Image (cartoon, rainbow, N blue to C red):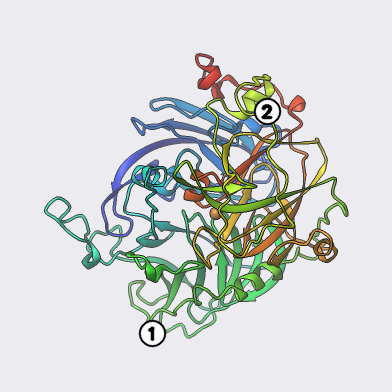
Amino acid sequence: ARIRRFKWDVKYEYRSPDCVKKLVITINGQSPGPTIKAQQGDTIIVELTNNLMTENVAIHWHGIRQKGTPWFDGTEGVTQCPILPGTTFKYQFVVDRAGTYLYHAHYGMQREAGLYGSIHVSLPDGESEPFQYDYDRNIILTDWYHKSTYEQAVGLTSVPFQWVGEPQSLLIHGKGRFNCSKLITTSLDAGICNVTNPECSSPFTLTVVPGKQYRLRISSLTALSALSFQIEGHNMTIVEADGYFVEPVVVQNLFIYSGETYSVLVKADQDPSRNYWVTTSIVGRDVSRDPSNTPPGLAIWNYYPNHPRRRPSTGPPTGPAWNDTAPRKAQSKALRARKGYVHPPPPMSDRVIVFLNTQNQINERRHWSVNNVSFTLPHTPYLIALKENLTHVFDQTPPPTGYDFLNYDINIVQPNTNATLGNGIYRLDFNSTVDIILQNANTMLPNNSETHPWHLHGHDFWVLGYGDGKFDPFNDPKNYSLVDPVLKNTVPVHPYGWTALRFRADNPGAWLFHCHIESHFLMGMGVVFAEGIDKVGKLPSSIMGCGETLGRHSP
Ligand code: C2O
Ligand code: CU
């Protein structure tokens, strides 16, 4: 195993990812940031210097379990104090599983200001993937707002509530193109939108050699949007999800939710005399009702030696209807662990926790809640508070483990008048097996239920099943998939449906479990699990310096 060292300079820069000039957070001048390439078992050392001038930062290594290093998970408020401007913080952790992972800011809403990138971990020497490919390519999908993250966050936490709305653009690996004529230009921001800017004048291009097989590592770090990804005229075969090999599934559209990573195989086997469109479009939300009416993101599948700028001779394919949930659920259910790579779950669990996901009004503000509790972060990170027994840092009463199953109707707008803010946590017995049922419901709008991609830090979980309507604790478990379920770290809960997960609480630490939609987490859609705290090693003082640990920081 090797040690891979990186020095990162994190700062704001003016950029025009979709031709509209805006402040973007870059790493060494890049957004998306540099891809971390490593081999299973390697140690990654990232020395991050916060040059944001007036803003804190923290970086989460999404999908990396941080076994033995829970303090380097990068979750501000849970596992560390924020990294102050002008200081350098050293992350050091082992990438213990091959696969495709991500990293991104985990402080405020900074992720959607451009602070994100990929982690590719290759198999140990002598091992190879159970599929063949000639080339390996990386694509991160995001959505893009013209408002700063501060304007968004202030709106979301103000009275009256101001919803961020739909994104203005969809970016394919950091590139998009806004229609400047849609921008209301005043003398103040004239010239802010410039389609001749080389940053945006040509779309992201994948140049392919006819006849070759491509492994595309596609991930999503959208702030809000669920996406459909498509390559005109080409099928894709899903072979990896969240770092695990899956049985091949052939799709025309890949549905992908924020926080998920996939590898798909694509054969460059179509008429090579022309180029093709690569598109992303929003599903699950009706963008046509929003002023931004987000257009699809476009990139080019360029057959060598055609000119990469040559426009495809056809119009970009239109994505699936936003409200057609059937193919999305079908894709979720179709994923199975790859034969020969099956890790079956324990047949029984020790504990079942049901999480009812609701939207509600608390003190005149709009929130998301889990079992009527809307999550707030304490000022001293949980990991430190737990390890040092600082019991006054957060509410010691555990939050509810279920809801009024018999009487609650998930299909109608509910007043949820008992909703509160809270920072209590779920303590799990070390090495116990825990089932989580994520139950979706109607939002505060009639006939509306959203899709929530839930992400678990520090663990992978088995996806036991998905269902429509209210989860039935007596009958639904009979249909759990226990033979070859996929292991994932992020999973969607479909509108008006439920998703059941199982994981082993075998990683000492404090771990966030939350909706990966940036605004939903800011509005309280998350919980914290803690397990095996007595087995957590000595905390580095570099994670301290805030709340109760003021003055205890040393780099
Ligand atoms: Cu990728 Cu807590 O998030
Ligand atoms: Cu959500």
On-image quarter of the N terminus? top right
Distance Cα–Cα, label 2 vs label 1: 60 Å
Residue 396: mark in rendering? 2
- In depth, the one of 323 and 194 nearer the eye is 323
> Neighbour class for label 1 at 10 Å: few (<14), some, many (≥20)?
few
* Along the line of sight, the residue nearer the viewer: 451 or 131: 451
Q: Residue at x 57, y 57 (%)?
A: 414
- Determine the secondary structure under disc 2: loop
Viewer-proximal residue among 525 and 224:
525
Q: Quadrant of residue 157?
A: top left
Evaluate whether residue 125 shows in this view.
Answer: no
Q: Position of residue 95 (x, y in %)?
A: 65, 42
Q: Residue at point 61% right, 75% down?
A: 327
- Residue 314: mark in rendering: 1
Label 2 vs 1, first from the N-terminus: 1
Q: Is residue 315 above or below residue 474?
A: below
Residue 513 position in % (x across, y down): 63, 45
